[in-house]
Image: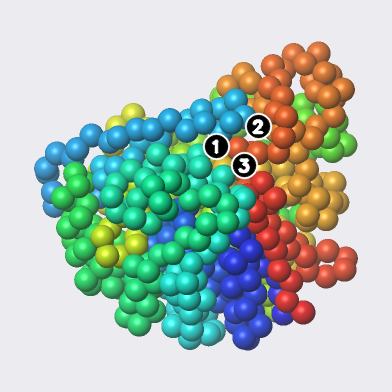
Amino acid sequence: MRGAVAGGHPLTAQAGARALEEGGNAVDAAVAAALVSWVAESPLTGPGAGGFMLVHRARDRSTRVFDFFVAIPGLGDDSEVSLMDHVDVDFSGGSTQRFHIGAASCAIPGSALGLETAHKSFGRLPWRDLFQPAVELARNGVELNDGQAYLHRILDLILRHTPESRAVYEQDGAALAAGDTLVQHDLAQTLELLADKGAAELYTGELAAAVVEHLRASGGCFTERDLAEYRVIRRRPVRTSFCGEEFFSNPPPSRGGVLIAYGLPLLEEFGVGKPGTAEAIDALARVMREQADAPAGRGLLRALELGGAGVVTRGTTHISVIDGQGNAVALTASTGAGSGILVPGTGIHMNNMIGEFDIARKPRPGARLSSGMSPSLVLREGSPQLVVGSAGSLRLRGAVMQIVVNVVAHGLPVEDAIDRPRVHLEGDDLHCEGGHDPAELDKLERLGWNVTRWRNRNLYFGGAAAVMLQDSGLAAAGDPRRGGAGVVVE
């Protein structure tokens, strides 16, 4: 067996599988899949995104994280930036969120340099070869599936915010719908440039100049120094144990992995219960309350110096890979909700991460931001058992934690672990996804929880992708909430 790949779109997973078939390793597969996700999962990721890649190498059983998340722009620039625009998005399930967009919301992206850095460290296939599927798809177009069409619908006010974005995300004066084809000729040219000249083209080359010029003309504060001085940071993952297995995830200064690592042993102490029962949900909810509000949780964040810049990544993609040698990659990336700013002639949709701040004051230019993104790994006796991550804004870490619990504690296969209905604690409201037993939810209310009952499954609760080593071999699954997919390569 050569390996398995899971992602947020079938084409994403297929691109990773193709790299494995051609003799690539887990990093090659993750890079190829990520490049296709820039096309197939636009606008949630792309060259204008930032993210994290957790890499486990079988040869020496080492695990590390490449941090290529976004940074604050404005190095060498004291000028005032324009105000951000805002739009309100309804998830059609009882939750509305405000998104801040426009040029002033854009932070320095890291995805292109992050992929290249990881590939130079561990990749096997030629860099240029990994771009071919993405270039072809950008040029020929990708048909929107139901999951992508739903995302385009709820993000419509962002996707058609400017003339440049309307030229890509609009057809005959209307938003793209399921069955329509998303064609991105300019992005295809950008991909070819990056394939030929490397990621430096976006940080010191012609692409960098185009990004800075357009962002400044549109009210942002990007400078050439911002891009030229951006660096990928290598970090040690956060680590804990849960039910006898080792859990690794995204370390400080990011928050998501740290809070999961804090919550899993706490849940084991409370008792995981039987899946879907009021007792199990009550334990999960108590852990979520501890993570969010309890003095211990706040103290943990302070101790790890996580009280500063934080980003709520609302639009996110994830890719999970295990190859036949036991190497593993968990890659999570995001443009936030997207800024609505497309750099003319490049197809690059910029992130809106500054607009996603959960902070009291803006950090200094060049500061690397914290994130809730949580690419994660479970090792059993030193070998990958589960690689998992998710989209889902504030629900992201809860989705990852619940999947880990479903696999490690409940012994569920990966598809069932992802498909099971989830819960999320938002303030005093315990949101319970459609599919829960109403009688168990009644019990939760008698336990004192304020239960919000959702009728159906919804992307609000996350969009995960996971690969797992089961008794029968490797298995991969994407989240049906967002049209994800998994591919196993024999």
Q: Which residue is mark 2?
A: 424
Which is more toward the observer, 42 or 76?
Answer: 42
Which is more toward the observer, 24 or 434?
Answer: 434
Q: Mark 1 or mark 3: which is in front?
A: 3
Q: Amino acid at mark 3?
A: Leu
Q: Quadrant of the N terminus?
A: bottom right
Residue 293 visible: yes
Q: Which residue is mark 3?
A: 459
Q: Which callout, 1 or 3, points at the residue further toward the start of the chain?
A: 1
Q: Secondary structure at mark 3?
A: helix
* Quadrant of the image occupied by residue 199: bottom left
Where residue 362 sits: x, y (%)? Answer: 28, 37
Q: Amino acid at mark 2?
A: His
Q: Secondary structure at mark 2?
A: strand
Q: Amino acid at mark 1?
A: Leu
Q: Quadrant of the C terminus?
A: bottom right
Q: Which residue is mark 1?
A: 394
107 over 41 or under it: above or below: above
Estimate how packed mark 3 is, as few (under 14), some (14 to 19) or many (20 or more) residues with alpha carbons within 10 Å: many
Q: Which callout, 1 or 2, points at the residue further toward the start of the chain?
A: 1
Where residue 402 sits: x, y (%)? Answer: 72, 42
Residue 280 visible: no
**Residue under the point 69% across and 16% down:** 450
